Image (spheres, rainbow, N blue to C red):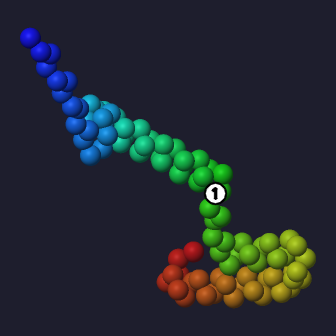
Amino acid sequence: MPTPAPREQVETAMGPWCGQMGAGGWLSMIAFWVVVVVVVVWGVSRLFPAQPVADARSILDARLAAGDIDPATYRAVREELAAQSATTTGGRP
């Protein structure tokens, strides 16, 4: 009796290995890459933190501390800032 011819294996469009991975494997792979991306974004944000936005009063204080302006100018500008903030906030500090 003649031996039967061997069956040909048909590869799927994604290769012979991807067809064997079930839904759990795909979900695990997606979860893994999401975790990798989140860790990378978190790490980069820790390496390069955002600078806080300085308000006019802190800039004025820094200029006085650096010696860019004299105390009289500091007091005059501080009073102008206080008057301006009182009119824009309705008298609230």
Would residue 33 appear left or right of 84 to someone viewing this image?
Answer: left
Q: Amino acid at mark 1?
A: Pro
Q: Residues within 10 Å of mark 1 (few under 14, many from 20)?
A: few
Q: Residue at x 21, y 31 (%)?
A: 8
Q: Which of the pair 23/60 is nearer the observer?
A: 23
Q: Kindly indicate the quadrant of the structure image that contains residue 4.
A: top left
Q: Residue at x 32, y 33 (%)?
A: 17
Q: Which of the pair 78/67 is nearer the observer?
A: 67
Residue 72 locus on image (x, y percent): 86, 85
Would residue 70 appear left or right of 46 to someone viewing this image?
Answer: right
Residue 56 locus on image (x, y percent): 68, 78
Q: Residue at x 62, y 61 (%)?
A: 50
Which part of the image, by quadrant, shows the C terminus? bottom right
Relative vertical location of residue 67 with respect to residue 14 in this rendering, above or below: below
Residue 93 at least partly seen: yes
Question: Which residue lies most toward the top here?
Answer: 1
Q: Kindly indicate the quadrant of the structure image that contains residue 65.
A: bottom right
Asked which secondary structure carries label 1, the reply is loop
Residue 27 locus on image (x, y percent): 30, 38
Residue 84 locus on image (x, y percent): 61, 87
Which part of the image, by quadrant, shows the N terminus? top left
Give the labeled residue for mark 1: 49
Q: Residue at x 54, y 47 (%)?
A: 40
